[in-house]
Image (spheres, grey):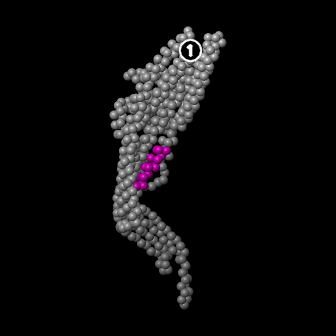
Amino acid sequence: MLFSARRGFLFASLSAALLAGTMGAAPAMAQTLDQAFIQSYQTNPQLLSARARLRATDERLPQAQAGWRPQVSTNAAVGRLRTEQVSTRTNKETLTPKSYGLSVSQPLYRGGRTEAGTERAKNEIQAERQRLIGAEQQIFLDTATFYLNVIRDQAVVELNSNNELVLRQQLQAAQDRFRVGEVTRTDVSQAEARLASVIADKQAAEGQLRSSKASFARSTGLEPTNLTPPTVPQQLLPTTLAEARELAQSSNPAITAAQYDEGAAKLTVDEVRGELLPTVSLVGDISRRHNQQIGVDRTASASLTLQVQAPLYEGGSTYSRVRAAKQTAGQRKTDIDVQRRSAVEQATQAFEQMMSARARIESLAAQIRANEIALEGVRQEAVVGSRTTLDVLNAEQELLNARVSMVRSQRDEQVAAYTLLLSTGRLTARQLGLAVPLYDAEENFRAVDGKWLGTDIGQE
């Protein structure tokens, strides 16, 4: 409760600092982080690319299902035939042979390849859906990071600008006192040096702000204007490190994707092994031929054949591919552990960074209050001559440093919180409750599942 109240005060202070820099400007509509999330969700090219990749992966299912279906082909031919028979008399004949036919081959058994291929495709599609969730979360984390970077950098620019004004007044006062002999040239030079330093810091902060704005625009397609300090959805955050680690292991999409990848790899072994087994097909042919030979105007034929083919030896290639598929399946199993450890590490680091930043914010709040009191005392003591100009400058610099550290710690705390949401699988449009139509990852899947014909696509 103490932290929540303190953070509300600190964000209010930050907002005041930002508003101070826009007092003389035309009012601009405030932007919120949710609006930035929605814009990224709808327009970010990386996310749109990931969705297209999923839709392409959906097509692996009808490709695998094709193994159940007949293969139908037709053929036609026409030619010109001239014959000449020479005996006691010469006979010449000219024919125009024609033929056409229809062939249908229906697979009955393919060594289990069709079943394995169909299930493999389903696993690959599920894995790609999880990767899409991961891409969505990463885009949201980038958006939040860039958003908070802009707020941080704007605040740092404002703090340095305000300090520049104070130091200009300090320099003017030192010059006035120097002219009447109250201070020395050294005091004036110290004020000049400190002013030059803060101007350099402000210029560096302005450069960083421009860079952060460019990153924000790249992620969202928006130019940042009057950003509103966000509030992390506390109800989605784990309250303990143990809870964070448990959620990372159970809900991180990278782990789930790796599990589906393992399932697909195991089915690939069955699919390749099926090439070593017999295949059974029912083949039907219908054909007609005209003018194929002299004296025969037309012939017609129809056949229905049960074909069985059994591979005996093909040089060892298929056996090698089976072994390779088994090795890949073993690799995919190991990848699950890799992703699990990575997710736990990310969740642990994010949780610790968030708690560390919160502790720093508490300490910095106390430091700022103490620095403000100290600065006021040093200024009063300088008036009566018990403090030097350098003492005042140092006190002002300490207060500025503390305020800048506060702004940066606030940003670090929120970025860590959003990173924690990502690692636990909760940084999604659905979990955040964004007011935006959610992308239906199954819509295209339903459209192509079992599709026999057509090259049109429903989404682009």
Quadrant location of the N terminus in the rendered image: top left
Q: Residue at x 51, y 70 (%)?
A: 77
The amino acid pointed to by label 1 is Thr
Residue 53 in sight in this render: yes
Q: What is the residue that sits farthest to the bottom in this orientation?
A: 88
Query: Residue 291's spot in the image, x, y percent?
Result: 50, 76
Furthest residue in direction right, as rendered: 179
Label 1 crowd bin: few (<14), some (14–19), many (20+), radius 10 Å: some
> In x, y percent, where is residue 362?
42, 23
Give the residue at x 46% y 47%.
53
Magenta-highlighted residues: 49-65
Q: Give the number of callouts.
A: 1
Q: Is residue 69 visible?
A: no
Up the image or down, 429 lies above or below 96; here it is above
Q: Is residue 14 left or right of residue 241?
A: right
Q: Nearer the viewer, residue 118 or 262?
A: 262
Q: Is residue 225 above or below residue 71?
A: above
According to the picture, the residue beneath numbered tag 1 turns out to be: 388
Give the main secondary structure, helix, strand or loop, of the magenta stretch: helix
Q: Nearer the viewer, residue 189 or 266?
A: 189
Extreme residue toward the top, this view: 384
Residue 69: x and y in percent read 39, 59
The quadrant in which residue 388 appears is top right
Foreground pick, 69 / 352: 352
Q: Which structural element holds mark 1? A: loop
**Position of residue 248 in the picture relative to residue 401 (left or right):** left
| Residue displayed at 41% across by 34% down | 350
Tell whether position 64 is magenta.
Answer: yes
**Residue 79 against residue 360 in the figure, above or below:** below
Q: Nearer the viewer, residue 274 or 154?
A: 154
Is 225 above or below relative to 74? above
**Residue ID at (37%, 48%):** 334
